[in-house]
Image (spheres, helix red, strand yellow):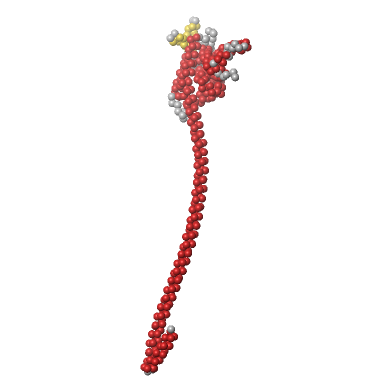
Amino acid sequence: MGEVHISLKAEKIFSLFGFSITNSILATWLVMAVLILASFAVTSKLSLIPSRIQSIFEMMIGGIYDLFKTITGEKIKKFFPLVGTLFFFIIFLNWMGLIPGVGTIGIYEIVHEKKEFIPLLRAGSADINTTLAFAIVSVVLIQFYGFTTLGKEYLGRFINLKNPINFFVGILEIMSEGTKIISFAFRLFGNIFAGEVLLTVVAFLMPLFAPLPFLALELFVGFIQALVFSMLTAVFLSVATTSHEH
Amino acid sequence: MDKIGVEPVALLTQIINFLLMVLILSKILYKPILKMLDERKKKIEEGLKYTEKMQLEMEKLEIKKTEVLDKAREEVKKIIEEGKKAGKSVEADIIKSAHEEAKHIIESGNKEIDSEKAKMLKALHRETVDVSVKMAEKILKDVLSQEDQRSIIDKKLKQIAGLVK
């Protein structure tokens, strides 16, 4: 192992129906499978007197639900599928990269007459496509909920012909919605990718013991980034669906 | 954008993945678990309410119990008093009738004694007369003649009879 393997892009593993499947997509599917199977296992035998595993799931979901409820109020019933999935999906995608073997087990391929290492799995959120996808869905759904809740008033925030100041503010609002996507996508990607790089470099320099505190730190960062993404979405949703005209 | 790795196919795949997760998780994870949490909350609330109600009921019952006990105590007191009164009157009756009976018995006894006394006196009278006659006969037989005897006896008899009377 003579060099550190760091790739900004997710690498292509194989092709499926002509579409190239990258290692981060593979990891995403793995996380999806685990989450769905775990959910099935728990919710197929729910009881009023909870088992231990049911208690843990209830604590996680109930806790996140109550946390978001403090932000959006009663509208949480409508928003929870979005913000809850953002939180749980992102946190497991983040932590996936910390599992030993993810990013280190892979194959060597000849690219451009050069032997190149291609890891089989890569933390799902360490791929800009994943974070950009989440950001786009999040912002699009914010617009959707804003428009369906407030209707014309929501549209009026962006296109306002009543006076020039409001017209200009409307343009700024449109731009801010666009920057939301960028900031969402790059905040998550940047944090998780940087964490991966940090862990790789530390493990390369000193493989024993030294990565431990950084692993703990990355666990924390993974949690915080998931919370930030979902909380910001909840805040934006709350702002988008609250009427300011009185 | 290409340098950082944005690819339309991968992007679309991840969007679809995410939307799928939203649908699946909300169906098989959030809905049942939140429903269960709500149900449990409701059950606990009901239980607490029920406990409160039962407590109130118990307090009411306690009050009722003391009321009934008080009432019963008063009744018992009344009954005892009445019994005492009735006993007293019966006692007085018994004493009175006993007095009467005693008086009656004493009276009848007195009467009997009186009649007995009279009988005995009569018998004594007769006996005395008989004895006197026999004594006189015996004594006079030796001393007096038959004539004298008779006269004296007659005289004495008359005397005794007068005495006895």
Q: Quadrant of the C terminus of chain A?
A: top right
Camera-nearest residue between A16 and A100: A16
Residue A33 sits in quarter: top left
Give residue A232's position: percent from left, percent from top: 56, 18
Residue A186 sits in quarter: top right
Q: Is residue B83 above or below residue A180?
A: below
**Residue most extreme to the right:** A165
Residue at image x 44%, y 8%?
A18
The answer to whether residue A88 is seen in the rendering is no
Residue at image x 50%, y 17%?
A93
Give residue B35's position: percent from left, percent from top: 48, 25
Q: Is residue A40 above or below residue B99?
A: above
Camera-nearest residue between A63 and B97: B97
Camera-nearest residue between B29 and A171: A171
Residue B107 sits in quarter: bottom left
**Residue most extreme to the left:** B146
The answer to whether residue A166 is seen in the rendering is yes
Q: Is residue A8 above or below residue B152?
A: above
Camera-nearest residue between A110 and A239: A239
